[in-house]
Image (tube, coloured by chain):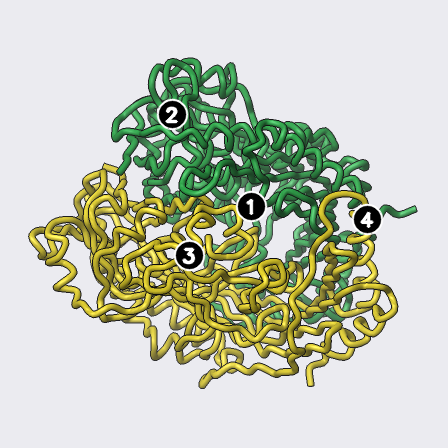
Chain colours: A green, B yellow
Amino acid sequence: MMPVGKRDLPSVTDALETVAATAKRMRLAEFDAFAVSKASRSVTIERGGVCGADSRIATALHVRACIDGMVGGAFCNSFEGGEVSRCLAEAAGIARLMAPDRRWSGFPAGADSYRSVPGLYDRSVASTDVATLGIMAEEMIDGAMSVSKKVAVPYGAVEAIERSVGVANSSGVDVVMKETQLQAVICCVAGSGVAISPDCEESGMSRGCDLRTDRIGERAGWIADRSTHLVKASTEECEVVFSPMSLGASDSGLLTVALSKAFSGQSVMQRTSFLMDRVGEQVWSDRVTMSDNPLLSGRCGSRPFDDEGLPTSKTQMVRKGVLREFLWDSYFGSLSGEGSTGNAVRDLASGSVGVAPLCLQLTPGRGNMHSLIEEVGHGYLVWGGQGSHTSNPETGEFSFVASPGLLIEDGEVVGGVRGAMISGNISAFMKSIEIVGGDVVDFGNSLMPSVLFRDVKVTTG
Amino acid sequence: MSELLAPLLKGVRSSAASGLDYVELRADDVAQTSIELRESSVESVTRKLERGHSARVLRAGRWGFASSDGMKDVASTVAEASKAAAALAKGGPADTSLCEVKPVKREVRPLAKIPLAGVGLDEKVSHLTSICRAVVAADARMTGAKASYSDVTGERVLITSEGTEVVHHISNAYLMAHASGNASNRMVSVRDEMGTVSAGWEHFTRAEPAEAVAERLVRKARLQMDGVPCKRGTHPCVISPRVAGMLAHEALGHLSEADLFAAGAFNDFVGRRVAPQSVTMVDSPRMDDGFGNVAVDDEGVVPTPVTLIDEGMLGSQMTNREWSARLGVPPTGNARAENYRVPPIIRMRNTYFERGDMTLEELLEGIGSGYYCVDVRGGQAESNSSFQVSIQECYEVVRGELGRPVRSLAISGLATKSLGMIDGLGKDFGFESSYCGKLMQSMPTSDGGPHISIRKGGVVFGGAD
């Protein structure tokens, strides 16, 4: 019997075959297609309880047509033959309006073989029903509220996703993969009025069913509870411990936002990376080794091929502080002579194909956030970076509020601070790494541990 | 008559005997054109065609939601949403109800003089090319320019079991341009953005011509290249209408959304003063070419303005039908959904401070020495009223006069304190248009106000040295 909320996933393989057959019929010699089919079930939390459930099916097909070096793109949300034909016709129509790209070298040829990446699909996640997600959400709420009676849970969600992704093109690429993801997020606050804590978010994601939502809730509840005892921050330069989330969250982590574009070969070719022209130089602390490794088993950013269908690989961009190389897709990799590293990423909103890390990793050291806190005589803990998404990835400049931010004295968190701004330039910042923790958290496109930085500029009112 | 109506009406009828308290069906049939361009080279042009529907149902005090692409078998999507709500029936609160509203039957059309769909791709590409070329040609230190444009046209339909039928003819367009420069090995990057949800292509050719956009970008980039670092700490300042808008949005706007108010810092300020008597702040569903304009919200409510601060006193909250019922207040029509794939949530529309009576010169004189913040590049709010706004155009103010430009920085503060430090409001008015993110949904909004002066202690300045 099919679980509640579980619906059949439209076939990506069939969609790609339809594209190929339609392109042949339309006599389109050069084409490329990317298809996604996704089923998700989720429950939402509001006001400390599970208040609703969702079940969604979504498909996306992005095609590109190339006519005499002119490339056009189109997107539709249906795999049906008529819509696929319309989509390809739109792409071909746009291509005919474009100026030829003299640097275009064609859609990339497929590889003979692809590395097997284990642990991407878990049948138990695919079959998780709404009622089970509801139980997991309640465990997360209970975990948060077990910390203190002061803790409240304004919102949160637990979601199970099953997805098929495929890429095919006229140069022989034809690959399909299936993946699952279970993810949970919770926001806690504690206290009331002017003493209320900031939003204390915590999240977790996994390819399998091993997500401990009660622990996620406990961590969010802990930080909210600690934030209610207000202490005063000072304008100073001192040691600061950054949580994994403040550095690695996919859309707001400081390192994810500030470094993803800097490592991109596209940015290098377009002269917008602050790391360009520095290969071989000691750019950061020798404690920093950073890689992109989508071949790791069971990680949420892991995958055997990129969004052009080329094999992914491990790329070490920085080794012991020395800049070694950048990430490439086929287009910019061809222009630079470096070749693709399998880092093409398709933006389904705009249809552009760019370059980005798939699984950015700061090589872990030892210990965890709490052992890093014990190393600090006087300093701060940054749990979340309010406004870190406004960091400037072209220049590396950032300025955000430590929120939640906590004061550390003699190795212990002594209370929450309000409005402490952290600012600087990421290039200088990465030179001041003191200790890299070992408590790696999976944020999908990054794997990030806690890190202790020294000489961090903190500003207060 | 929209072709989307018939399958949705059939879907509502299918649910009539299923014991559901409320059924809301939404469908989109839209086409999007996206262009990405760098200097004079087109990076991508994509045409996006989307057609799909969703069902949101209220069953025994709990929400169920389901979405599906295409328009086939709406009844099974309703059944799926109903099953999802029923699956949660054993635990947690089940107290959701909706305030009553009069059913609406309306067809909403844009006011475009030059319809977006009628403008050729070549003309749109040419407009972006003009911006990028003008930026690079303006100054030898400019190293690059990039422009992204997207427009969405088509239909969005809402049907409810209460008899509401709304057809929106959509005409949305948005343009963002970036400029990069390099002075003495120091890179700078600035941006500019604009959008419309009611006008047509004339918004870009008449209201925001390419030359004006390029000029703004170059001015901001030059200021960044020639600028000095800000002095970290708190200073008196004057903020422009664009920054005032961002402050309105981030400092109090989000916390006046009823779903966030309950657990927010202003919960303790009901009936109390939060700002000087001269300060009034409004969220309005209609303003001239407002990017957040809403004719009928995504629950079928005809929207009304909400006074968030009324002569310094904390005002009303923005609500959807659920929160209106919970609070026992009339609905304000703030329920908005990004597309058919997601349920509507409480969102701002056009949020602004009302005008005062001072000139910019008087405001600058009033602060003596400090900073004049002119343009923003995003921000964020928190439940405890902490706000952060990134500033990409700023000047020193020395003895009431504008001084040197200041490099990239951010301002922050606690709104519960900062609003009380507002010292003066200008008699001018302006607004900015951008996308606001909440719970993974992106929504067009406008934010504005007059020039505003803030005393020392109101905001903290931080930036890279």
Q: Amino acid at mark 3?
A: Gly
**Residue B401 image position (x, y, % from top left):** 9, 57
- Locate residue A240, reporting x and y percent: 37, 24
Tell me which label, 2 or 1, sits earlier in the chain: 1
- Quarter of the figure that contains the N terminus of chain B: bottom right
Of A338 and A162, the residue lying toward us: A162
Categorize mark 3 by other alpha carbons within 10 Å: few (<14), some (14-19), many (20+): few
Residue that label 4 marks: B87
Contact between marks 3 and 1 (CB within 8 A): the answer is no
Q: Position of residue B235 (x, y in %)?
A: 19, 45
Q: Which residue position holds label 3?
A: B271
Disc 2 and disc 3: Cα gap in Å?
A: 34 Å
CA separation, marks 4 and 2?
Answer: 44 Å
* Residue at the spot of label 2: A407
Identify the amino acid type marked 4.
Answer: Ala
Marks 2 and 1, how far apart in space?
41 Å
